[in-house]
Image (spheres, grey):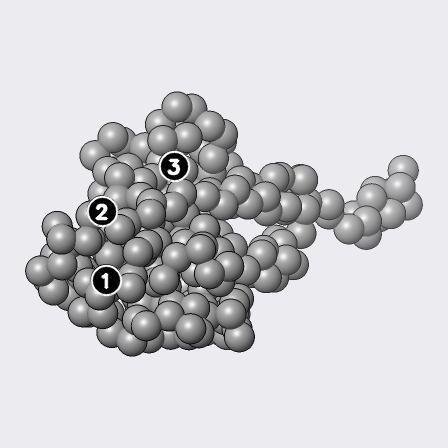
Amino acid sequence: MKCLLLLLAALPLFAVAETLTVSAATSLTDAFKEIGPHFEASKPGATVRFNFAASGVLLQQIAQGAPVDVFASADQETMNRAAEQKLIAVETRRDFAGNSLVLIAPPDSPVKRVRDLALPAVKRIAVGKVASVPVGRYTQQALESAQLWTGLQPKLVFADNVRQVLDYVSRGEVEAGFVYRTDTGLAKGKIVVAMAVGGHAPVTYPAAVVADTKRAALARDFVAFLGGAEAQAILSKYGFGKP
C-alpha cells in the first residue's frame, strides 16, 4: 500500500482541459493567431478559440448570448457599450494595444492626401460601417474634422470590417479607403499609404472578461497575458503600439 501511494505521488498532475473563446476585432486577426499558441503553452490543457469580426458585431453576438469568455475591441466606445449593458466584468478591463488610422489608395489613384478625396476623379471611397466598425467611426471623426464628411457621402462605400476596406482598395474597386496602419502590410504592392490621418480619438484596444463566462480564471489570465512582454512583442511585430 505504501509503495502504491508513493507511485501515485510521483505521477504528474494533469491539467483540466479548457477551451477559451476570445471574440476579437478583425484587425487583431494575425497578431492574436500568433499569441494564441504562446498563451496555450503557458497554460497546459488550455485551448484558445478565436472569433474575429467587427467590434460592434461581436458585441451584438455577446448580447445575444454567444458563449464568449474574452472580448477584445478596436475602440473604447464599443467596450463602453459592453460595460453599460453589463456584458463584461468591468474590473478586468485593460488597454493592451494602440494603432493609427491611415488613408490608402491603389498605386494609380490620384489620392495623395485627405483633401484629394473631393476631386471629381475620385468616385468611390471605402470606409467601415459607422454603426458597427470602429475604423468607420474613426474615419467619420477625421473627415468631420476636415469638414469633408457631409460632402463625401455620395462617394462612400461602406464595408463590414477593416479588412474588407483593404480588399476594396487592393482590388482597385475604389479610389481610396481608410484602414489601420497594421493592415497595410497585407497588401504590399497593391496599395500605397497616402498619409497618416489625424482628427480622431486615439485608436486603443481594450480587452475584458465577459460577465457570463464559465472560465473566469482562465479568461482573466488571457487578458493579463496580453499586457505581458511575450504578447506585447508579438503585437509590436505586427505594427501595434503601446495603448
Residue under numbered circle 3: 57
Residue 154 numbered tag: 2
Left or right relative to 14: residue 39: left
- Number of numbered discs present? 3
Relative to 151, 34 lies left or right: right
The amino acid beneath tag 2 is Pro
Disc 3 residue type (three-letter):
Val
**Mark 1 vs mark 3: which is more N-terminal?**
3
Q: For mark 3, does the 10 Å Cα neighbourhood hold few (<14), some (14 to 19), or many (20 or more) residues?
A: some
| Residue 178 placement (x, y as % from top left) | 33, 61
Tell me which corner region of the image, top left, top right, bottom left or bottom right, holds residue 97.
bottom left
Image point (45%, 51%), residue name: 164
Q: Which numbered disc, 3 or 2, marks the residue that appears first in the sequence?
A: 3
Mark 1 → mark 3, Cα distance in angstroms: 34 Å
The correct choice, above or below, for 115 with respect to 130 in the image is below
x and y, in percent, of residue 241 in the image: 36, 72
Q: Are marks 1 and 2 in contact (CB under 8 Å)?
A: no
Q: Quadrant of the C terminus?
A: bottom left
Name the quadrant containing residue 27.
Answer: bottom left
- Kindly identify which residue carries mark 1: 120
* SS state under label 1: loop
Q: Residue at x 41, y 63 (%)?
A: 227
